[in-house]
Amino acid sequence: MSKVVDHLAELTGFRDRDVLDTTLAGALRDLLEPQRVAIHRCVGEESSRRWLTRARLAADEAAATADPLWVEFDSLPRLAEFPARVAAIDTHEPVNVPGTPHVTIFPLFTDRDVAGVVELESVAPLDVDQLRLVVSILRIYRNFQSLLDYSERDTLTGLLNRKTFDEAFYKLSSQPAEDNTAPAGERRVRASTQAHFIGVLDIDHFKSVNDRYGHLIGDEVLLLLSRLMRSCFRYHDRLYRFGGEEFVVMMRCASDADAGRAFERLRASVASYQFPQVGNITVSVGYTVLKPGDTPSSAFERADKAVYWAKTHGRNQVCSHADLIARGELADDSKVGDVELF
């Protein structure tokens, strides 16, 4: 019993979701001693969801492996390629796949949606006590995920909230431009020189929406906009609601032009969408590349200047801070951190 308590204490001691999955895999491996434990997440939109491996840990391995964060989405297997996993999700019950090894698949849920599955490979089927132990641990895991969601996500839209931005910023900006670290024989992320970008999105004339239709309709606009954002960006792009009608995106692209096309895709989707009762709305977007030595505030300030320029020059457009500097529309007051360069 003390071993179980120790693992539960470790599992709930982290606030990093990446570490949380590897910790869960390690706990199940140590407690049940299977041949292998794997955690597979469902990523992407409903019509084209795929499996992303978040942790994979064999009995003789010291550390878990996983798919690279920036793996190409199209290289991931489709949900239908693993019908037993889909069956576990659909039935909300463990699914047994007899064979050598025997595979037991447990559905993994959050309060908001389907998260994925946990797979245990073992020599023999799990007994009743082992099944009960896994289900209990996953229930605690789900409850802890709910607590993280409550503290880290905007209650209306489900997007990440402002207070998680700084930590994610430093984590994202510290990642290498290329990631070819997938294990031998596994899918690999496309090798290309890529940079990180931050974009600030602001709804045009949103105050008039609240004034004319009321705050309930305004909240519906915010909720629908968040769904459009999820459909326009990739599963690994980080989407935030900073408050009111202001949203932030952190993403990685090959170039400033590629980032601009991604934001333009969102702008066009919003402009063509018919919001109930309100009709059409538009958004203004400003974005910037992350520079060496950037702080969250310095990068956000550049993107915010670009979106302010967009809103004061016609709205309903996407503006690159670097492009505005090159055109002489904004002064180049470059900073590294909070120290001005002379």
Image (cartoon, helix red, strand yellow):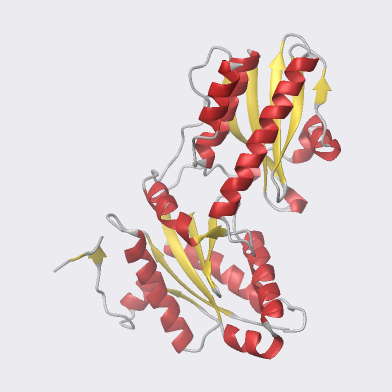
Locate residue 93, reporting x and y percent.
Answer: 82, 32
Residue that protrudes farthest toward the left in the picture: 342
Numbered-mark total: 0
Q: Is residue 132 above or below residue 218?
A: above
Most foreground residue, 211 or 259? 211
Residue drawn where x is 49% and y is 37% of the image: 14
Residue drawn where x is 81% and y is 33% of the image: 88
Quadrant in the rendering for residue 307: bottom left
Q: Is residue 9 above or below residue 238?
A: above
- Quarter the C terminus occupies: bottom left
Locate residue 159, reporting x and y percent.
Answer: 59, 59
Can the viewer see residue 253 in this picture?
no
Residue drawn where x is 52% and y is 70% of the image: 243
Locate residue 234, reporting x and y percent.
Answer: 59, 54
Residue that protrudes farthest toward the front in the picture: 2
Most foreground residue, 115 or 195? 115
